Every structure is written in structure tokens, then in C-alpha cells.
Image (spheres, rainbow, N blue to C red):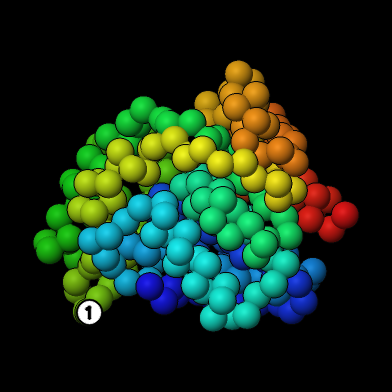
Amino acid sequence: MKLHYREMGEGKPLMILHGLFGFSDNWQTHGKKLAEYYRVILVDLRNHGHSDWSEEFSYDIMADDVIELASDLELEDLILVGHSMGGKVAMRVAQKEEDLLEKMVVVDMGTKSYPMHHEHILAGIHSVKVNEIKARREAEEQMRVHIDSDGVLQFLLKNLHWIEKGKLAWRMNTPVLEREMPEILSAMPEGEVFTPTLFIRGGLSNYILDEDFESIENQFLDCHIETIEDAGHWVHAESPSEFLEMLLSFCLR
């Protein structure tokens, strides 16, 4: 699939992959700052953002999409950054096409499988009567019954857009994402990776626990794991300055 992307800056390429229910807009602020150092490519993964929808959805397929985009753009020595689900896509790219990458940054995502924990998000999305509401405020009110975090709520509401006057629609393909949730939450396949890799975790998040370090290090043989103590799963949004400093100190050395 030909993915939608946006570019800014010039120089060595740095590509950013968003997480589940996200899209490239989530990374625009960071992208602009990173564009002072790199040619930044912000990607919409399939079934998200402005990229096409598809019934096919897996980490293998998403990794192939990214590899195809890198080939189309003639990228070499790519720095690949991925948050959450995008982090697993990045790890799968490294397993499939390691020569493409110079470095990789995985943001708050481990290699293990995860239990289902998106029920409240899916309930909030399903609660929005997109064919009836006339204002985004109505969607927010409907979703707030199920989602009490303002940050998560605003993150999801960015996916609502006007497809015509008075008619809202979601940018993400919720039916397929919900159907493929077992795949999204699955563990990484076996396979060692030698790409220099930085894992950045949130100290308030449970996505990478201390006991997960050994399994990550056994698979990513040239990696180190850093913690931003006061951040949760959305590390880059909750501690933007510390996150950027940590990312750049790794990428620029």
C-alpha cells in the first residue's frame, strides 16, 4: 500500500510511526523540531489518518508498507522512530530489512504480548453517533461517558473530521482495528536484531516493566533502555522536552 506521509526538513532521513488510533498529525510538533536536524517523514499507517483502509492488517503487512515507502523515497541509513503499535512496526521492519536502518527508537513498547486493555476506548468510539451529531462537542460528550482521561479523549477526537458539511466521520478503520486487536497485542516473532536501538519508556506506564529488560535485550542485541520517570504511555506528549533531548542525544552521536 502507498502510505500517506508528510515531509519536513532535509538531511539524513528520520521516519516516525504513530501508535494505534493515531496518525501523523500527532507528531507534527516534534517533527518540526527534529526537522532542524533531519529530513523528517511523518507516516500514516494503513487504516489510520489519510492512508487507505484495508481488510488486511498485520505487523508483517505494515512493515512491508513502510519498507515500500522507504524504497519509493530512496531512503538509506534511515533512523526509524515508532511509538506503541508503531514501535512494533519499527521492530518488525528491523527484523525484515535491517540493512535499511542506521538506528531505531522504540517509544514505550516491549516485545511481549499484552492483554486486552482498549475496551473503554472502543466503547467511547462506538458511542459516537456520527450520522446524527452536528458538532464535535456532541462527540466529546458521548465519549466522556466511557473515557475519563482528557488527554486520551482529545487524542481520539483528532480522528473526527468533516467529510461534508454537517457530516462527521472517523479517520481510522475501527471495525478492522477492533477485529485485529489480538494481532495488535501479539508478541514480536523471534529473530535477533543488531540495529542500535533506544527504548524509551514512561516510568508511569506498564508497557515496559523492569522484568521485561532481559527479553528485550536478548532480541535487540545493541540496545539500551531509558526511562522518563514522570511520563505515562504517551511519553513524547507528556514530557516533550526530556523526550526530544533523549532521542537527539542517541540519534546524533
Report the residue at 67% width, 32% height from top.
217
Choose between 6 and 72: the one closer to the eye. 72
**Left or right placement of residue 157 versus residue 13 in this view:** left
What residue is disc 1 on?
164
Say whether residue 230 is visible. Answer: no
Q: Please tell me in which quadrant of the rendered image residue 113 appears.
A: top left
Q: Please tell me in which quadrant of the rendered image residue 161 appears.
A: bottom left
| Residue 108 position (above or below residue 204) | below
Residue lying at the far left of the rendered structure: 132
> SS for tag 1?
strand
Choose between 44 and 111: the one closer to the eye. 111
**Left or right placement of residue 160 versus residue 14 in this view:** left
Say whether residue 92 is visible. Answer: yes
Q: Residues within 10 Å of mark 1 (few under 14, many from 20)?
A: few
**Left or right placement of residue 154 versus residue 210 in this view:** left
Choose between 51 and 137: the one closer to the eye. 51
| Image quadrant containing the C terminus | bottom right
Q: Which percent across, then down, holds residue 192?
A: 62, 41
